[in-house]
Image (cartoon, helix red, strand yellow):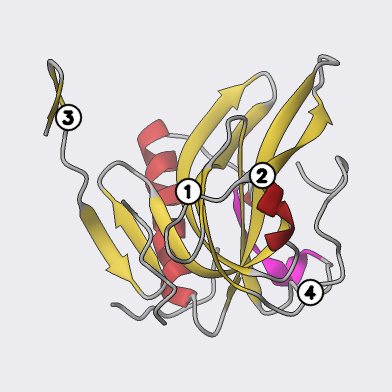
Amino acid sequence: MKIGDTEMAERTVVKKVENAVLYSDGTILLKNLRASYPHVLVPREQDNDDGKKTKRWDLVGLMQKSTHRAAKDLVKGEIDRILAEKKAKVAADKRFLKNGDDAGKDGYEGHYTISASETKKPIVKDRDKRKMTDDEDDRFYGGCWVNALIRPWYQDNKYGKRVNAGLVAVQFLRDGEPMGEGSRISEDDVDETFDDESQGWEDSEGDDL
């Protein structure tokens, strides 16, 4: 594919498992996530260590262990690949993929969790792939169901080493039972891909993260 004078590599599917797709540009589509603390249309403001305020769009996605084991393994595989490429070690609590049983939060048990954030607004779509607007922010709350496109990346700076996930795009999927957390989270509590969902592999063993 060519844009202007620049030759662009075609974006292709590298691997597809139940509830997850890995693309050649390094992004991962995760399907059927239960949203926790979503800020996907209207950002939250946070104070940085240098005292400056920044806007951040973020989401914690809950993946049921009974349905998302293969998706978890795909994400873990990408984290392991990034660390091997960087020849680095990063503690489990510094990775965007975690075991929800260890979170100590209601509703997280029996799930894997992914945390994704971005300092620029992600693309947000409705079930029919219509672009959503900021005045629809109340459609997103703790407990609703979404699809999310994320991009894992390695951080190594004065704030330490981590494997983070950028929040590229979100698609509202359906309503769900509210989690009781409200649609917002405090600063202290949070540090052409989507299908038309209006209509409407591989298995893995083990539970290690």
Q: Position of residue 35 (x, y in %)?
A: 66, 64
Q: Position of residue 12 (x, y in %)?
A: 20, 50
Q: Earlier in the sequence, mark 3 or mark 4?
A: 3
Mark 1 vs 3: CB contact within 8 A: no
Mark 3 vs 2: CB contact within 8 A: no
Quarter of the image where one finds residue 164: top right
Q: Residue at x 47, y 76 (%)?
A: 69
Q: Position of residue 49 (x, y in %)?
A: 82, 20
Q: CA distance from mark 3 to mark 4?
A: 42 Å
Of helix, strand and loop, which one carries label 3? loop
Q: Which mark is residue 134?
A: 2
Q: Which residue is mark 1?
A: 150
Q: Which mark is residue 8?
A: 3
Q: Which residue is mark 4?
A: 178
Residue toward you, 194 or 91: 194
Q: CA distance from mark 4 to mark 2?
A: 20 Å
* Image position of 111 with respect to 142: above or below: below
Which dot, 4 or 2, sits closer to the camera? 2
